[in-house]
Amino acid sequence: MKERIAGFILMCAVVPLAIVGYLIICYVGFMGRVERGRAGVRALDHFVNASVFNGYAWESVSSHAWRERDNKRWARFVIWLTNKFQQDHCKRANKREQPLVDLMLQKGLHRQTIK
């Protein structure tokens, strides 16, 4: 119960900041430094992976899609779509991110933190 209450309080602060962050990403994407926009998009990618696709917070949608390619329809769609822009994007993302996923699982960072 403590975790749910803490999560609710945290989200009351984070969601408005996330909206501001999204607007900043849009602005920076057109007018600012590419590096800042790229970092923001990467963070948004990880947020979407964790919240929408029930993935790990430290993994991109592309890497998650590659792991789930045999089990999930959405993963096959993501792979098909990204291949239109960059061949084997999801496979390469997974190759790059899988060691990090393995380390996070080994260290138990996916477990509940507030008890």
Image: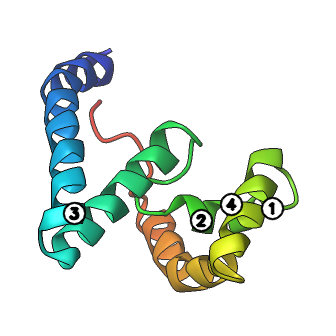
Give the residue displayed 41% in from the left and 62% down from the top.
58
- Gap in angstroms between the C-alphas marked 1 and 3: 33 Å
Earlier residue among tags 2 and 3? 3
Nearer to the camera, 71 or 28: 28
Residue occupying the far front of the picture = 30
Tell me the tag on residue 65: 4
Helix, strand or loop status at disc 3: helix
Quadrant assignment, res 38: bottom left
Discs 1/3, front: 3
Residue bearing the label numbered 3 = 30
Q: Amino acid at mark 1?
A: Arg
Say if mark 2 contacts mark 4, CB within 8 Å: yes
Q: Give the alpha-carbon distance from disc 4 to disc 3, as whole Å.
A: 28 Å
SS class, disc 4? helix
Q: Secondary structure at mark 2?
A: helix
Q: CA distance from mark 2 to mark 4?
A: 5 Å
Q: Which is more foreground, mark 2 or mark 3?
A: 3
- Which label was assigned to residue 62? 2
Image depth: mark 4 or mark 3 in front? 3
Left or right of 112: which side holds 29? left
